[in-house]
Amino acid sequence: MRMRDLHWLEYLIEASCLGLFMLSAAMFATLLQHPASPVAGHLSTPLGRRVAMGIAMGLTAITLIYSPLGKRSGAHMNPAVTLAFFRLGKIERHDAVAYVAAQFAGGTAGILAAAFLAGGFVSHSSVNYVATVPGPWGWASAFMAEALISFVMMATVLGVSNTPHLARFTGVVAGILVATYIVIESPVSGMSMNPARTLGSNLLAHSAYSLWIYFIAPPLGMLLAAELALRRRGHSWVRCAKLHHTFDVRCIFRCGHAPAPTESVG
């Protein structure tokens, strides 16, 4: 492999996407949950706070997916997503490795940036660096929940993105699922679905004991969805590893989209 085969800009953009997502998560959690926040006083119930957080993070995900950054990198923002697309044959091995490394670096940088900008607000117990830890039902329930939501997310993304008349809505559907999971599932596992999203937060929150759940369950769920898609549809069914593919932006993946039509010169 030659240096020119490495797609450095895409790797940097992918790191930036998850970094921005984590920065947004920490800032919204502080705004919605910290007792000193004037907004938190109007959200008196845990459900109300989860609904507000779900809307905020769902919109953040949608914005990033459809942004110029997301269009360029594909906006995986998750090693489990990248591994699933690698299993589907849409990503070169060196790109998959670089994407996963970029995601861990970006996620950690994002929460560190939030801690630097907001100081003690992000470290307060009400925010706790937006760490993801098992709920009162224990680690087994958290593990199963993480695997399930990851499976549903990947299966849905594959189904929508590879249906021509629905493909442009993939980012919206993914964002809606993120919002729904935060509202419904987060009491069970904290709603990670993403090893790179959890690493930095849990290390800062001294919650490394639960990292194994979020390192194993999300990839397991998404790889299962990818495997089922392969067995039912085959490699050729999956068009691209981008969540939102456009023809005016470079694609570094094994893309199955036909080139954009060009006007003939008469």
Image (tube, rainbow, N blue to C red):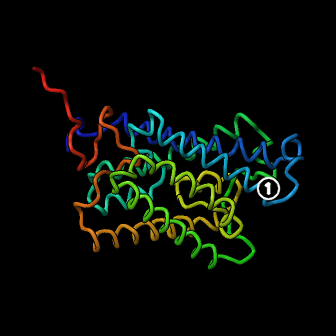
Can you tell which quarter of the image residue 238 is in?
A: bottom left
Q: Is 139 placed above or below 113 here? A: below
Q: Residue 143 location in percent, x, y?
A: 58, 74
Residue neighbourhood size for the residue with mark 1, other residues' Cα within 10 Å, grouped as few (<14), some (14–19), many (≥20): some
Quarter that holds the N terminus:
top left
Where is 134 relative to 257, above or below? below
The residue under the point 28% across, 47% down is 253
Q: Position of residue 111 (x, y in %)?
A: 63, 44
**Tag 1 secondary structure:** helix
Q: Residue at x 40, y 69 (%)?
A: 225
Q: Residue 132's quadrant in the figure?
A: bottom right
- Residue 191 falls in image quadrant: bottom right
Instruction: Estimate the x, y position of residue 108 in percent, counting from the top left.
Output: 57, 46
* Residue occupying the far top of the picture: 266
Toward the viewer: 169 or 92?
Answer: 169
Residue highlighted by disc 1: 48
The amino acid type of the residue labelled 1 equals Gly
> How far across and how far down the image is residue 3, in percent?
24, 37
Residue at screen point 67% across, 46% down = 56
Image quarter of the C terminus: top left
> Which one is in front, 188 or 235?
235
Q: Is residue 175 left or right of residue 113?
A: left
